[in-house]
Amino acid sequence: MPNFCAALHCTRMSSHSVLAFFRFPRDPERCKKWVENCSRSDLKDKPPEHLNKYHRLCARHFEPDLILKTSPFRTVLKDTAIPTIFDHPIKGKRTNEEEEDSAPQPKVKKVDETVEKDDDPAKESANGQEASTEPAVTDQAKEQREYLHSLFDVVLMMGRQNIPLQGHSERDQTSKVFTPSNVRALLEHRVGAGDAALRRRSESTPVDPEYCSGAELERVLELVEKWAREDLLREVKEARFFSLVAENVVEIGEEKHIPALVRFVDQENSLREEFLGFLAFEGDVETIAEKLCAEVGEKYGLDMANCRGQAYFCAGVYAVKVKAVATKICETYPLAVLTPSAGHALNISLANGLNMTSVHLVMSTLEKIDAFFSKSPSLQDQLESAIAIYYQGNDEKGNALKEASRADWTDQHDTFELAIDLVEALLLCMDSIHDNEEQKWSDEIAHDAFVISEALSDFELVMALVVLKNTLSFSRAFGKNLQGQSGEVFSAAASLTAVLHSLNEVLENIEVYHEFWFEEAVNLAAALEIPVKIPRLFFRKQRPDAGEEIQAEAYYKIHLTFPIVTCVIKELSDLFSENLVNALKSFSLVPAIMAQLKYNTEENTADMYKDDLPNPDTLPTELNCWKIKWKHGTKNVTLPPTVYETLQLSDVKFFPNVCALLKVLYSLPVLSLDQNRCSDAKKRLAGYLQDTPAKHRNKILALVNITSTVGLDLDSMVEAYQKAYPDNDPEAEEPAS
C-alpha cells in the first residue's frame, strides 16, 4: 500500500514520488513536536506507537542536513530530526499573549508549489536560484516505479505472512530460476483489486502475461535481503564484538543449513540476540568451517576476529560434526570460545552430544512425546488422568507431575528425573490412546501413540534413561546456575572442578555404581512389564559364538554405563575450556560479586581480552580504582548484581577498560538472555521452522518473517532497485516458467 504524507495540505504519496517517507518517532516528546509542526489536530490524541505504525512525513518537510544516506539501500533521519518546512505557519507553545508577540517564530520555509509535480522539468526562480533538484520523471519510468512498488509489496507480504514462492507446485530441478506461482497469483489478485499499473502491464501482453521474470524476482529478493539485514548488521558492527548462536541443522529445499543468530551488546548496553540467517552446512568439517567463516565475513561483513563465543545446539547425527566445526573455528580464532547455549538446559545439550544409539533412542522419544502432546489439549488431559491413576495415594507428587507435564518438561535440567517418574503414566496413556476403544482419536494420533509406546517398552531405553538420570544428576545444579544471574554463573565456574571430580569418582568405581543403576532399571522394567534383554542390533553386529551366553548386566556396563560417564566427562571438559572458565571468573568485576569475594578478585583472568581493551596498559591501575570505588564508596548503596545493571551506571564511563571487558563477557552465549531487553528472534525462528515444510522454505522470505520488527520502506527499496538496475525492462527478459 502506498504511504501518504501526514502534513496538512501535503498531497504527496509514495507511489507517485521518489522522495523518502519517514515514520513518526516513537519518542513521545519528539513525536509531539512532529504532530504540532505538521498541524494535524486529529493526530494529537494518537499515541506514538500508533503514529509510528500508520503515519509518515515525506522528505520535503526536513532540512537537507537532517537526512542521511547511510547506504544505496537506506535513507534515514538524524535521531534528533524535527520537520520544519511546511506551507503553513508552525505554532510554537506560548504561556500568554505577550510571549506570543515577543517570542521568535521557528524557522519555516515556504514550499514552492511549482515543484509539486514529479514530471515537471527543473525551473529557476526569479533570483536565479534553482527551484527544484528533482529530475523529470517520464510516464514510462513512473509506471515502472508503480509496478515495482506492487512487486516489492507482494514479496514483503509473502515473507511476513509466510507464503511460499512455489505454493503447491514443485520447483523444476533443472531450472535456475524461481517458479513464482504464488507471486503471480497474488499479483493477479491485485489486478482484480484495482492495481492500475499491473492492469496496464497485463493488458500490454497479448497472451498469458508473466508479471515478473525469474531473474527479476531473484534481484528483488536479493535487495530485500540486504535491506532487512542492514540495520541489524550496522548495530553489530557498532558493538564490534559478537557471538554466534546456532540451532539444530535444518533442511531448506534439499540442502542442509544451520540457523544462526548473532548475539551482541547494543548501544544501550542491552544484550540482544537477532536472527542472522541460514549458514550452509554441506561438505566435510574443514569445508564447512571455511564456508561458515567466509559467509559471515563476506556476505554479512562481520570480522570473525571479533567473534568471542560460539554456541551450537544440535541433536542426533549432526552433533558430533557441528562440534568438530566449532573446534576447527577455534583453531583459527582462539577467542571465539565454544560455550553451552544458554537457551537450552546443559543436561539436554550434554545428552545430545553423546554419539550412542541408546541415547539417541531416548532423545528422539522425548522429542516425539513433546510433539505428540502439543497436538491437542485432550491428549494432555489423557496424560493427567493416567498420572492420577498411578499416584492415587500421593496427591502432592501427582499434582507436581501434572504441573510439570504442562510445561516444556522435555527440555529442562531435570528432564530425565521427570521422565523416570512419568514413564509408567506415559505408557498407560499411550496404550489407551492406541487401543482407541471409544474411537476418540484419529488414526494418525493412534499410530503415533503406538510408536511411542513401542519405544517406551524397550529395556534399552529404560536402562539408558536410568543411566542418564544418575550420571547427569551431578551436573544438574551446575547447569541451572549457568542459566541464572551473573553471581550464579560465577559460582558455577568455581564449582566445575567439583562436578568433574564427582564424575571421575563414579568412573573409578563404575562397577559399584553400575550395579545399583542396573538394579534400578530392572525394577522399573518390572513395573512396566518389560522383559530385560540385550538389543537385537548387538546380536546382528557381533554374531557371538553358539553357546556363548552374554549377561545383560555386563553388556550394559560395557556398552552403555561406562561410555556415557566417560563421554559426559569429556563433553564437560571440552565445553568448559580454560579460556571459558577464565572468562566466567572475570564476572568478579560485577560489584555484588566483588563484595562477596571481599574484593580479593583475580586480575589475571582478563589477560586473554587485553587486546580488546581501549587502554590495556592502564588496566591494573583501573581495576584497583574500580575495587576502591566499591569497597569504600558504597555505604548504604545497593551494589549492582548483574552485568547489565553495572553497565547502566552513569560513572562506568570513567572506567573504559572495565566497561569494554564487561561488554565482551556479556556477549558470551553462556549467559541467559533477559527477555525484557532482547528480541524473541529464536521463538520466531522456531515457529517458522515448525510451520514451514523443508521444500517450501526460502532463506530470504524466512529472514523477512523472522525479523518482522525491522522497518522496510517500500519507496526507498524501489528507488534503490531502480538505481541498481536503471535499464531494467522486465518484459524484455525471459519469463519464469
Image (cartoon, rainbow, N blue to C red):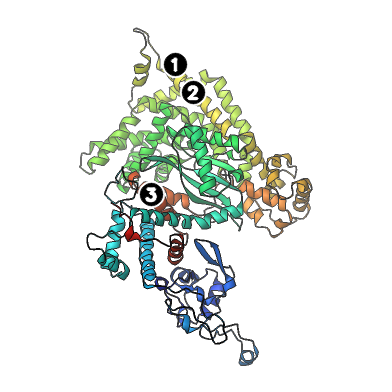
Q: CA distance from mark 1 to mark 2?
A: 13 Å
Which quarter of the figure has residue 556? top left
Image quadrant holding the N terminus, namely: bottom left
Q: From the viewer's perspective, is residue 570 above or below residue 389?
A: above
Q: Which of the two marks, 3 or 1, is nearer to us in this view?
A: 3
Task: Tell me the crowding category of disc 3: few under 14, some 14 to 19, or many 20 or more residues within 10 angstroms, Cα based.
Answer: some
Residue at 71% across, 46% down: 594
What x and y, as percent, mark residue 402?
Answer: 39, 43
Towards the viewer: 254 or 122: 122
Residue pictured at 55% horizontal, 20% vertical = 509
Q: Position of residue 195 (x, y in %)?
A: 31, 69
Residue 86 lies, with reference to residue 457, above or below; the image says below
Q: Is residue 400 left or right of residue 585?
A: left
Select label 1 or label 2 by which is in front: 2
34 horizontally vs 204: left or right:
right
Q: Nearer the viewer, residue 527 or 546?
A: 546
Q: Which residue is the site of mark 3?
A: 698
Residue 181 location (% of width, % of height)? 28, 54
Q: Earlier in the sequence, mark 1 or mark 2?
A: 1
- Residue bearing the label numbered 2: 563
Q: Earlier in the sequence, mark 3 or mark 1?
A: 1
Depth order, front residue of 439/443: 443
Q: Are marks 3 and 1 in contact (CB under 8 Å)?
A: no
Q: Which residue is mark 1?
A: 554
Q: Disc 3 versus disc 2: distance between alpha carbons?
A: 40 Å
Q: Earlier in the sequence, mark 3 or mark 2?
A: 2
Q: Position of residue 393 (x, y in %)?
A: 38, 37
Q: Amino acid at mark 1?
A: Ala
Image side of residue 313 versus residue 183, left or right: right
Crowd rating for badge 2 (residues with CA inside 10 Å; few <14, some 14–19, many 20+)? some
